[in-house]
Amino acid sequence: MDTNYQQVAWHCMNKYVGITTSDGQSHDGFIAHVDQDYITLAIPTNEMYGQMNGMPAREATYRQFGFFPGFFPRRRFFPRRIPFGAVTGLFLLPFFI
């Protein structure tokens, strides 16, 4: 059975998915873009900017940008383009906040 991953990816747009590729790698992230040849995932990372748990480098800027105690900047995402020819599996994953 030959699956049309482009159509499946289009229906799963902006959802958290897992993708396996023909070289054995697996990726998970939100589908950010789908075109004729590629699927683009927004993959979450735990990296924050600055050295103090995501806070800006200077304490004087905490209040200016709204960084009160207990509030930190959101998680960052980086894009990963995967060609449809390499996709061997695409499946929805549960996402909990």
Image (spheres, grey):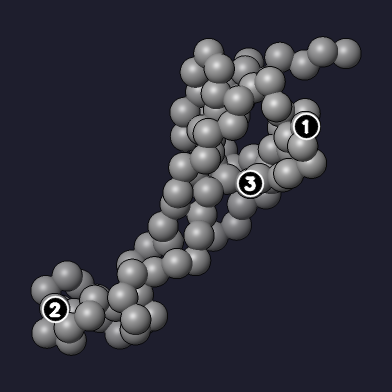
The earlier-in-sequence mark between 2 and 3 is 3
**Residue 49 found in image quarter:** bottom left
Total numbered circles: 3
Residue at the spot x=34%, y=84% of the render?
52
What amino acid is found at the position of numbered circle 3 in the picture?
Asp
What amino acid is found at the position of numbered circle 2 in the picture?
Thr
Q: Secondary structure at mark 1?
A: loop
Q: Which residue is mark 3?
A: 28
Q: Depth check: give the residue in front, 86 or 9.
A: 86
> What is the residue that sits farthest to the right in this orientation?
1
**Residue 89 shown left or right of residue 57 in the figure:** right
Q: Which residue is mark 1?
A: 22
What amino acid is found at the position of numbered circle 1 in the picture?
Ser
Q: Which residue is mark 2?
A: 61
**Residue 2 shown left or right of residue 92 in the figure:** right
**Residue 36 shown left or right of residue 6 in the figure:** left
- Reply above or below: 53 against 40: below
Q: CA distance from mark 1 to mark 2?
A: 47 Å
Residue at the spot x=53%, y=48% of the render?
43
Q: Depth check: give the residue in front, 21 or 28.
A: 21
Q: CA distance from mark 3 to mark 1?
A: 15 Å
Asked whether the viewer can see residue 7, the reply is yes
Instruction: Where is residue 41? Give x, y as percent.
Output: 53, 38
Number of residues whose C-alpha sits closer than 10 Å to that of mark 2, classed few (under 14), some (14–19) or many (20 or more): few
Of circles 1 and 2, the one toward us is 1
Of circles 3 and 1, the one toward us is 1
Q: CA distance from mark 2 to mark 3?
A: 34 Å
The earlier-in-sequence mark between 1 and 2 is 1
Number of residues whose C-alpha sits closer than 10 Å to that of mark 3, classed few (under 14), some (14–19) or many (20 or more): some
